[in-house]
Every structure is written in structure tokens, then in C-alpha cells.
Image (cartoon, helix red, strand yellow):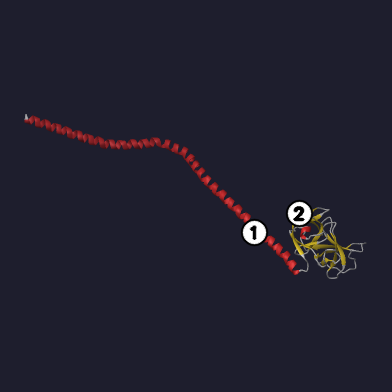
Amino acid sequence: MADSRRFRNIIILIVIILLCLAVITISFRGSGLTERIKARTLDIFEPVQEKIFSFFNPVTVFFSSIGDYIGLRQKYLELEKENARLRQRYVEDISIRVENDALRKIMGLELRGEHELAVVKVIGYYGNRWQSEIIINSGTAGGVQEGMGVMGDSGLVGVVISAGNSSARVRLISDPQSSLGARILSSRKLGLIEGSQEGSIYLRYISQDEEIYKGDIIVTSEFGQYLPADILIGRVRSIEDIPGSPYREIEIEPFEDLKRLEYLAVIRN
């Protein structure tokens, strides 16, 4: 009995050992199978995964781009505001500089000259074939009266033809109705400065036998009620002898650019 029981126990032990070996073998084999299943699964789903990525990636990039665009748009707007502010400051600085330069020239005339000047600014302009006038921002309240001369830093530009309380109209020397007494500085010969419909300025009533040369300086005469003598007007641009006329055709180039007037001075005495 003892031998048979021992034999049976040995058989059971062998069976248990074989079962353990079988389980271990299956476990290792199952591990390789699992890896193969995983690999096969990846192979099967790889095209699907690629399609899903290809579909959703642009969407993801799009929404990411929207966020970036919003941020860049905000930065762009901030830069635009800063740029506009800098441009405005630049324009203001340039305007102040130009204004200071113009006023400095006008005040320099007042300090150097013998005349009482009122510094004014041009606030209006009228120009056509029949009229060349400007409006200035000073009138009778500032001592400006009809007949007074108006000049820039280089020479005469016109005469006040009417004055209100705070503004006045100035007829330019190029106006067809303008007529002022003038002299040739070198010879002191008298003539009249007159405008024309085409905007040119002429020295009239200089006879054919009078000596006058291109470049001669023309100044005001002493026969105006308010306009002093020897105020610079311009220089002779051209001289033409008209057959049958006792007078020469003399065109004058004004010292002031009559189309770019801004700050001027009224001669108040």
C-alpha cells in the first residue's frame, strides 16, 4: 500500500510539473502572440489613423492659426495706433518748425527795418483770370487799414483793399486791377507796376530810350498814401521793344512766390 501510494504521489507530482511547464510555455507563447496581434492591429489601423490625422490636422492648424491671427491682428492694430501717433507728432513738429522759421523771418524784417509791421497769416485765396486776392487774419482791430502794403520776407505781395474787424482782403500785385507806383532802383526812373489776366507782372510807361537791363531791381515809389518807398518788388525778367509803341514791354519777376504765401507782414505806417 505504501508503495502504491508513493507511486501515485509521484504521478501526481509529475502531472503538476507538466501542467506548470505547459502553463509557462503557453504564457511565453501568448506573449509573442499578443505582440503579433498588437503589431497586426497597428498595421490594420495605420491607414485609418493616417486618414483621421490628415482630416483633423488642418482643422487643428486652422484653429491654432485663428488664435495666432487674433494675436497678430491685435499687435498690428497697436502698431498702427503708434504709427499714427508718431506721424501726427512729426507733422506737428514740422508745422511748428515751418511756422517758427516764417515768423522769425518776418520779425527779422521788423527788427531791421524802419517800418511798423503787423505779422499776419493767410487764411484764404482767390485766383482766376479776373482776380488774384488773399484773405489775412487781421483787420481794423489789429491796426490794418485799406491801402496798406503787405509783404513777405523777400518783397511786396499786394495792398489791402478792404478791412473788417478781424480780417482783410489783399489784392496781389499780379491782379489785373493792381496798379502801383514803382521805380527802377538803378536809374530811379518812375513807372507803374500792373498785373495781368495771365498772372504776369509788368512795369509800364518806361520809354524806349530809357536805359533798363534784365535783372534790374524794381522798388515802390514814394507816392502811395500808406505804402512807403523803396520796398522791394522784384527784378526785370524780360524787356521787349514793341514796334509803334513809345514804351517798352517789361516783365517783372516778383521776389515773393505769390502762389505759396502763408505768413506775411502788413506795413502799418
Image quadrant assignment for residue 222: bottom right
Q: Which label is found at residue 93?
A: 1
Q: Visible in this render: residue 125?
A: yes
Q: Residues within 10 Å of mark 2 (few under 14, many from 20)?
A: few
Q: Residue at x 40, y 37 (%)?
A: 46
- Percent of width and height locating residue 22: 22, 34
Q: On the rendered image, what quadrant is the C terminus found in?
A: bottom right
Please name the amino acid that badge 2 sits on. Answer: Gly
Cα separation between marks 2 and 1: 23 Å
- Percent of width and height locating residue 196: 84, 57
- Percent of width and height locating residue 141: 77, 58
Please name the amino acid that badge 1 sits on. Answer: Asp
Q: Residue furthest bottom?
A: 186
Element assignment for label 1: helix
Q: On the rendered image, what quadrant is the N terminus found in?
A: top left
Q: Earlier in the sequence, mark 2 or mark 1?
A: 1
Depth check, front residue: 181 or 66? 181
Q: Tell me if 43 is positioned left or right of 259 in this view.
A: left
Depth check, front residue: 161 or 85? 161
Element assignment for label 2: strand
Image quadrant assignment for residue 168: bottom right
Q: Which label is found at residue 124?
A: 2
